[in-house]
Structures are given as structure tokens and as C-alpha cells.
Amino acid sequence: MFTGIIEEIGTVQEVRNQNSVRTLVITAEKILEDMHIGDSISVNGACLTVIDFDDQTFSVQVIKGTENKTYLSDVQRHTKVNLERAMSGNGRFGGHFVLGHVDHLGTISKINESANSMIIQIKASKSILNQMVKQGSITVDGTSLTIFDLHSDAFDIHLIPETRRSTILSSKKVGDNVHLESDVLFKYVENILNHNQSSLTEEKLKAFGF
């Protein structure tokens, strides 16, 4: 479980591909302080498991199933990545419930930038847009953000200066892909509604007097 509050920006130092498994070696500082083998780390919003670490780097593996739902297969050396450790039991919950399971890839379609703000429009699939509400939460590359506006095929996020400073989102360009994870609470609501609709038959409607 994560919160979507990015702890630091890491850099991919090395990429190794072997037997359909991609290993990323990432430089970091803060998140290495209490790291253990087997820890879960959110790398641009994808929950990955630590397989090795030293005092400057840690290694995670990306399997084929993860590659198919993310753009991690395209990540190369020197790429900057958002990093967050799994939430601790005594920590503050500053963002929202984030599982680290990427739902879809979005594509940046427009960027409006000024001195104090940056509005990014992200084109997304209808299925994930149906799980959004204006002023609701969305995770973009592991960052917990508020949905600024909704469109028929896209949504807007508004980056404050602190988010621009502490995440990789300010370096994204039009055409770049981003990892999207919708709010897990909306997934449960959608599932319940779909279940109720599928179980609503003509016979049941008649029984209720319709």
C-alpha cells in the first residue's frame, strides 16, 4: 500500500535483460535508509520488489506481465523515476490509497505552463475515465493528484510548484506516456453497481411491482 506522496527522484543506473526479465538498478538516497530484500517500492507508480541493494543503489525486476501494462520496458539508463516506499504503520497518510497496480497507460496531449502553475491534459481510456470524478483522486506515475477537470476522452491535472519540484512530472512532454491508477474506492463502487445491474432481471422487477 502506498500514498502517492513521492519521497525522492531516483535515476536508472543500469538495465539488464535476461530470460524475459528486466532488471533495473536505480540510484537513490532516502529510501535506502531502512531498505530490506523483498521490500515493495513504487517506481513511477508500479509496485516492484527489491531483489538487491547497497549503500547507493537498489535493484528491482520487471516481469513480462508488468511490462505489458506499463512503459517500464522502454526505460533506459539515466531515466529519472518517482520513488516511494510502502506505507509504514505509523506514518502519516498524506495522499490517498494507492496499490501500485497500474491500470492503464495515459498519453500527455496538452501542457499549459506558467510561472506558478502547470496544467497537463492526459488522454485516457473510457474505462478509467468512468472511474473518475472532478476533484477526485488519480495516481499519475505514482503521484497522488487531484483531477482538475474531466473531458470526454481526457482529464486535466494541476501541478503546484512543490509537485513540479519533487516529481518527474514537470519534465514530461506532449506525447509521453504516463502510468495511471484510479482510486480503489471507485473500483469497488463500479464493481458493486455492475453486479447489481447484472442481477436485475425482468422477474425481479415484476416482483418489486414494476
Image: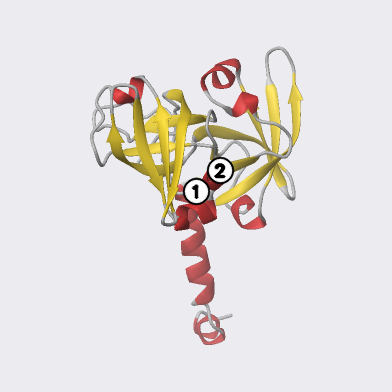
Instruction: From the viewer's perspective, tell me whether residue 206 is left or right of residue 96.
Output: right
In the picture, residue 95 is in which quadrant? top left
Q: Residue furthest top?
A: 115
Helix, strand or loop at label 1? It is loop
Q: Is residue 188 visible?
A: no
Q: Nearer the viewer, residue 68 or 206?
A: 68
In primary-sequence order, the first of circles 1 and 2 is: 1
Tell me the residue that label 2 is attached to: 179
Residue 17 x %, y %: 45, 48
How far separated are the C-alphas under marks 1 and 2?
6 Å
Q: Is residue 205 visible?
A: yes
Residue 132 x %, y %: 59, 47
Q: Nearer the viewer, residue 105 or 116?
A: 105
Q: Amino acid at mark 1?
A: Val
Residue 143 x %, y %: 51, 32
Q: Residue at x 44, y 56 (%)?
A: 20
Q: Residue at x 66, y 49 (%)?
A: 124
Relative height, residue 194 to residue 29 (above, below): below
Tell me the residue that label 1 is attached to: 102
Q: Residue at x 56, y 17 (%)?
A: 165
Q: Quadrant of the C terminus?
A: bottom right
Helix, strand or loop at label 2? It is strand
Residue contact at pointers 1 and 2, CB within 8 angstroms:
yes
For label 2, count other residues whose C-alpha is less than 10 Å away and answer few (under 14), some (14-19) or many (20+). Answer: many
Q: Amino acid at mark 2?
A: His
In the picture, residue 79 is in which quadrant? top right
Relative height, residue 61 to residue 19 (above, below): above
Residue 109 x %, y %: 75, 39
For label 1, count other residues whose C-alpha is less than 10 Å away and answer few (under 14), some (14-19) or many (20+). Answer: many
